[in-house]
Image (cartoon, coloured by chain):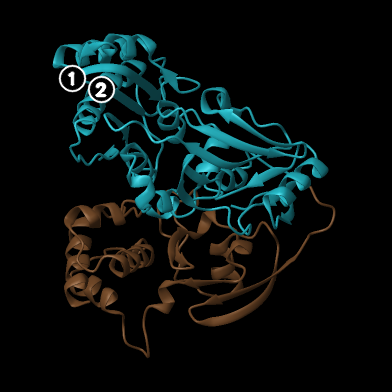
Chain colours: A cyan, B brown
Amino acid sequence: MFPRAFHYHRAGSLKEAATMLSQLGPEAKLLAGGQSLIPLMKLRFAGPPHLVDLNFIPGAAYVKQDAGGLRVGALTCHADIEDSPAAAAIPILHDCAAGIADVQIRNRGTIGGSLAEADPSGDWAPVLLTLNADVRCLGPKGERTVPISKFVVDAYTSALGEDELIIEVLIQAPPKSSGGAYIAFKRSAPVYASASAAVRLAMEDGVCRDAAIVLGAVGLTPVRALEAEAALRNNQVTAKTMEAAAEAARAAADPQPDMRGSAEYKRQLVTALVKRGLEVALKRARGEKVELSHIYA
Amino acid sequence: MPEQEQMVAIRVKVNGKEHKLQVEPRLLLVELLRENLDLTGTHIGCDTSYCGACTVLLNGKAVKSCTVLAVHADGGEVLTVEGLAKNGELHPIQKAFGDAYGLQCGYCTPGLLISTYQLLQRNANPSEKDIRKAIAGNTCRCTGYQNVFKAIKAAAKGA
């Protein structure tokens, strides 16, 4: 299968990419790792007349630790985040990066591309929502920083303007006594998750001071399970409160029945994933090292 | 749609050999290999970035060449299954796949060999879990995975 013919524009810098976008108009598309866009173009679901290629921009892929937190360049591929010692300090990032699709796709697909695509089943948005990450964007008028909660607008719709691109994701290191976990269930490695859960617990003297629970692939956007969070906040994290949170998360999920399973099946998944995620997050908050990964047959 | 087909000049090293080519931007890497360079060892399976039959190394990283544009290889290096054997001698990974019957129809084999090559380059002594993870993006519809596992373990011991 071939994509429809298009004009190819190779950007030499992020700034040049923004300029190209504004000159070429709204029909132009950005090409990062291409792991979503190229299949869409081959299937002729997308046929942009212009592609602005970001792959040859030097210095746009990195994971850096500085005083402001962790900085991840938009063009950083999932595999590089998986292998990054700086990212490993925030285990939920490794949970996510190491489980996205398969080795080959992680070698090409980028964090910026994934966020800009805003696929309801994407892995990064739920994870970054629990971390209150910021997305740095660049357009012809300059830079702006958008909180991730404002960045994801709707299914396949981000807050990016037509002539804007993501340049960096900023992640504040969570406090020491907190723990996070991301767990996704999928039918096989290369496919999107049937359901996923990202959780974060901030603990203090055995009591949960703050909690974030965000569900993926069970709504048009990631679903923040506020009642599930409330079930834990200012409580001890016990089997009983985790159960209550998982039940509240199940109620918050709004899944569509599709080839990945019925709505009821996906709700069941949510209950199990939230419970498992909370167990791991709690252990991590206590300083234990726990390995966690996407589940697939 | 562009009125006139745009051509892009690229330079790419494939299995150690330098090529200078003019390509359409929409040309996929797998088509460049198979059609322009006559390297038909890399297979097209699902053509939707699922099955991994088209796996090659691009700048040392395994990628699904049906989901990478040929222009992305510009200035880079590609290793295909044809580049594994040296001087008429099969690569130890290829030998191990043969010895362990790690293939049935053989369609997925070029991709599996390249994924194994990347795994063993990074991890000379992979665990069962490491192997599973490394070949999760390669589908074998004959479902001969058990022998593929044996082959990869044998190749790791021999490497």
Q: Where is residue A258? Give x, y as percent.
A: 42, 24
Q: Is residue B145 above or below residue A220?
A: below
- Give the x, y percent position of residue A51: 70, 49
Q: Chain of mark 2?
A: A
User: Tag 1: residue type?
Assistant: Gly
The residue lying toward the viewer, choosing from A32 and B29, is: A32
**Residue B81, disc:** none
Q: Distance from label 2 to label 1 (Cα)? A: 6 Å
Q: Amino acid at mark 2?
A: Met
Q: Which mark is residue A206?
A: 1
Per the image, the residue denoted by label 2 is A203
Q: Position of residue B120 (x, y in %)?
A: 28, 68
- Tell me whether circle 2 and circle 1 mark residues in contact (CB < 8 Å): yes
User: Height in image: B106 above or below A129?
Assistant: below
Q: Residue at x 33, y 21 (%)?
A: A266
Quarter of the figure with residue A248: top left
Based on the displayed image, in which of its 4 quarters is residue B68 positioned? bottom right
Q: Secondary structure at mark 2?
A: strand
Say which element carries label 1: loop
In the rendered view, does B104 fall on the left or right side of A125? left
Q: Is residue A258 above or below residue A1?
A: above
Q: Are marks 2 and 1 on the same chain?
A: yes
Mark 1: few, some, or many residues within 10 Å (few <14, many ≥20)? some
In percent of the image, x 26 and y 18: which residue is there? A271
Instruction: Chain letter for mark 1, please.
Output: A
- Within-10-Å neighbours for mark 2: few <14, some 14–19, many 20+: many
Residue A133 at x, y percent in the picture: 48, 31
Choose between A262 and A53: the one closer to the eye.
Answer: A53
**Extreme residue in the front direction:** A67
